[in-house]
Amino acid sequence: VGAGARRAMVMGRGGAVRLGSRGMATAKSAPVAKGGLLWRLAHGSFDFEEDMYSQLSGVPSPSASPAARSSAKSVTSSRLSNGLRVASIEMHGRTASVALIARAGTRFVNGYSEGAPQVLARLAFRGSELQSALAIQRMLESRGVSNEDVGCVLGRESLAFHATCGRSGAEWSDSTLAMLESVLRPAFLTGLANPGARDSMQAELTANVNVLKAHVPSTSELLNDGLHSAAFGDSALGMPLCVESHKLESAAQLELLSEYISTWYSAPRLLLLGVNVNHAELEQVANMSPLPDLPASDAVSLPPEKWIGGERRVVSDSGATAVAFGLDASAQGTLSAKPDGIATLSVLAEILNGPADNVQLRSRVAPTAHVQTALTHALRERDEFAHAESLGAHACVSSYSDGAMLSIHAVSESADPSVGLDTAVAQIASSGAVLGGDLPSKVSAAKKRAALKALASLEDPHSV
């Protein structure tokens, strides 16, 4: 009781407790009559308030139809003259996000071009044939866009170039044009057209590659690459995201990068997606960019991916011991599979993770029926493994166009393999033990967690 307060009343369902002026408490256990003054005070119900369960006049009843609920966030889609798809979705948020998704990830490299996707991802927003890197940087700063708001997410199937900024037309349109120019017409192409600029462009390219070479892969990144290599072999989906320094140097050649762009950047392989932007304006910006000049057909056809299976052991200086176990889920988890199969894998991963794993909503985006994008998969793949080190044993689903994997991985803090291996395996074993006991109640709880994460991801413009 604060100074000057003579008495206070604390109410509950069973009665009231009165605090006297001297702080002494006396209890009265008589029940509070329903509808009386004390009951109204305790339940927040007064004559001038409306019952939460009553229908308000003039307000339509909410629809329980899934189609009616999804129509509020329906996707508007159109195509450019060459067939490239432009899509947008309105989420009524304060910021706008635009992404160019190119199906040109690491699975499409060979022994000659390995490292090219990593280099091209690094070059986004770092100069084009029309603007220097400094000019783009100053433009973004004048629009209130920081370095953290732009970039590229490197995935096995796709490169997702993205920019997040304000909703005004000048902010997102200028940022989008700078993104498209730097991706489709990067600055190093001037070195091919102008021999006098070749040396300077090669030097700038080498400087960017040196930044990539300075990155030291974490235990979780090495675990991710090793698991995919064991599952899919040493090509396609088995190609690593973390590339050795000498391969990055080999890929940093003007002709090689130009050939990679001309081979994999075609209209059928690209998608321009906007969130909280006007669709007509987005289509207008697309027509002002190099997008309409891209080839209208895809000249490359690759065989579908196959699950191989096996074992990989990787030695590194990461200072930890990690173990991963993967299951072939291609029949249920590919992008062309039925939504029921994808949902089953998501719920199974939630069961293995347990209720304590519910603290990370945005990091692990559950696969969501028909609205899976390359950007969503790239973000999920990156963030799933990034949290493995802090969560012990952890299960996740990796989905691709023609392959999928349900994996359980664990990281031990011990760098001694004899100790860390036993610890990590024990973590995985304890994770699998949750499949016993009262399984129906665990399935019910896991469904709710998976649904909550899916809904949370749909409220985030960047994830969408």
Image (cartoon, rainbow, N blue to C red):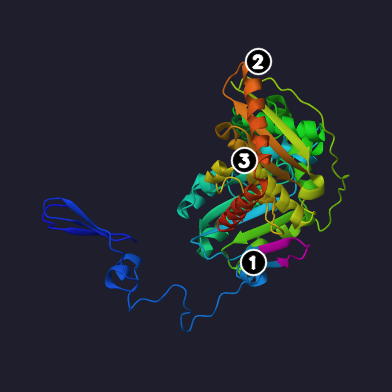
Disc nearest the viewer among 3 and 1:
3
Q: Can residue 312 be seen in this view?
A: yes
State which tag comes first along the sequence, 3 or 1.
1
The quarter holding residue 321 reads: top right
Q: Can residue 113 be seen in this view?
A: no
Work out how far the residue at label 1 is from the one at label 2, CA to CA, in angstroms: 60 Å
The answer to whether marks 2 and 3 mark residues whose Cβ atoms lie closer than 8 Å is: no
For label 2, the residue is 418
Figure quadrant of residue 196: top right
The picture places residue 369, in percent across and down from the top left corner, at: 71, 57
The residue sitting at the bottom extreme is 58
Marking on residue 105: none
Q: Which amino acid does label 1 sit on?
A: Gln
Check disc 3 and report the residue beneath it: 353
Please report whichever mark, 1 or 2, sits nearer to the chain's N-terminal start. 1
Which region shows up in magenta? 78-87
Q: Where does the image place residue 186, in percent across and percent down from the top left?
A: 66, 45
For disc 1, the marked residue is 284
Relative to residue 432, is residue 33 drawn left or right?
left
